[in-house]
Every structure is written in structure tokens, then in C-alpha cells.
Image (tube, rainbow, N blue to C red):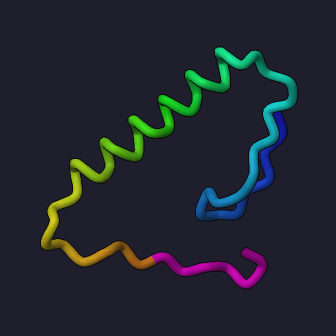
Amino acid sequence: MVADVNVFGDGLVQLGIVRPEAAELLAKLIVAGLQAELDATPADSPPAVRLESPDA
């Protein structure tokens, strides 16, 4: 695994060769994490502001 990210954690992670079952499980975990973030955010709260670095 090789990661190339900025200080905000944005970037790319190269996993190399993975089995299809592992890729499917990873995708499901990512979706579950994103859904949990959405469920924890009140609907009337303003969106989070992210400052992008110049190289992003």
C-alpha cells in the first residue's frame, strides 16, 4: 500500500493487487462510514468549510 496525501488527508492510496471480495468489503465500509457521517450531521447546520492547499 502506498499513500500520497496532503495535510488534510486528501489524496490517493494505491492498494496494489487485491481480491475482488476485499475490494467489495472496502467499498461497503467506505459507504457505511460516509453514511454515518451524514447521519451525524444535523440538517440545519452549515456545510463544513475546507481550505484547499495550492497543490490539491
Q: Assess whether residue 51 is covered by the magenta stretch.
A: yes
Q: Is residue 7 left or right of residue 34?
A: right
Quarter containing the C terminus: bottom right
Residue in the picture at 73% in, 84% down: 54
Q: Relative to 34, does residue 18 appear above or below in the rendering?
A: above
Residue in the picture at 34% in, 44% down: 35
In the figure, residue 9 lies in which quadrant?
bottom right
Residue in the picture at 56% in, 22% down: 25
Q: Relative to 7, does residue 51 appear above or below in the rendering?
A: below
Q: Which residues are magenta?
A: 50-56
**Percent position of residue 43, x then y:** 16, 66
Q: Assess whether residue 24 is covered by the magenta stretch.
A: no
Residue in the picture at 45% in, 39% down: 31
**Percent position of residue 34, x then y:** 40, 46
Quarter containing the N terminus: top right
Majority secondary structure of the magenta segment?
Answer: loop
**Percent position of residue 46, x then y:** 24, 77
Return the residue nearer the eye: 7 or 33: 33
Q: Is residue 56 left or right of residue 28?
A: right
**Percent position of residue 50, x then y:** 48, 76
Marks counted in the figure total 0
Q: Relative to 47, does residue 33 appear above or below in the rendering?
A: above
Q: Is residue 39 left or right of residue 48?
A: left
Looking at the image, the residue that sits furthest to the bottom is 54
